Image (cartoon, rainbow, N blue to C red):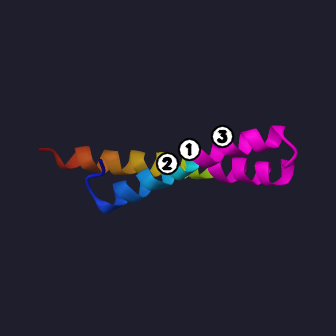
Amino acid sequence: MAANRKQGSYLAEFIVAFTMFPAGLVLITSASRGIGTLLTIVGLGLLLHSAVGLYRIKKLEFSRGS
């Protein structure tokens, strides 16, 4: 679904983060609190990074006009 390489990399990062974040939340509630906390923090950071990256690309896409 990505039109160029940057969109593809941010989309792949979003998919990984979208899996990592809830997995970390589940692990926090179970016995593995350390790895769960790490997965949650890293997943949330990747979600924010991919959202900002995709937003910046989208802005550039519309500025060219068609």
Mark 2 Cα within 10 Å, few/some/many (few <14, many 20+)? some
Q: Three-letter amino acid code at disc 3?
A: Pro
Q: Residues within 10 Å of mark 1 (few under 14, many from 20)?
A: some
Mark 3 vs mark 2, CA separation in Å:
12 Å
Q: Secondary structure at mark 2?
A: helix
Pointer 1 with pointer 2, Cβ within 8 A: yes
Report, in whole angstroms, how far the alpha carbon at label 1 lies from the one at label 2.
5 Å
- Does the magenta segment cover residue 29? yes
Q: Residue shown at 36%/60% (left/top)?
A: 6
Q: Is residue 22 left or right of residue 1?
A: right
What is the magenta segment's predominant secondary structure? helix
Q: Between residue 26 and residue 41, name the one nearer to us.
A: 26
Question: Residue at horizontal 56%, vertical 44%?
Answer: 18
Q: How many marks?
A: 3
Q: Tell me the CA gap for discs 1 and 3.
A: 7 Å
Q: Are marks 1 and 3 in contact (CB under 8 Å)?
A: yes
What residue would you read off at disc 2?
A: 15
Position of 1 compared to 44: left or right? left
The secondary structure type at the circle numbered 3 is: helix
Pointer 3 residue: 22
Front residue of this view, candidates 50 and 25: 25
Label placed on residue 65: none
Mark 1 element type: helix
Give, as a single range, the part of the protein colored magenta: 19-44
In percent of the image, x 42 and y 51: which residue is there? 11
Q: Nearer the viewer, residue 24 or 3?
A: 24
Name the residue beneath numbered marker 1.
18
Furthest-bottom residue in view?
5
Q: Amino acid at mark 1?
A: Phe
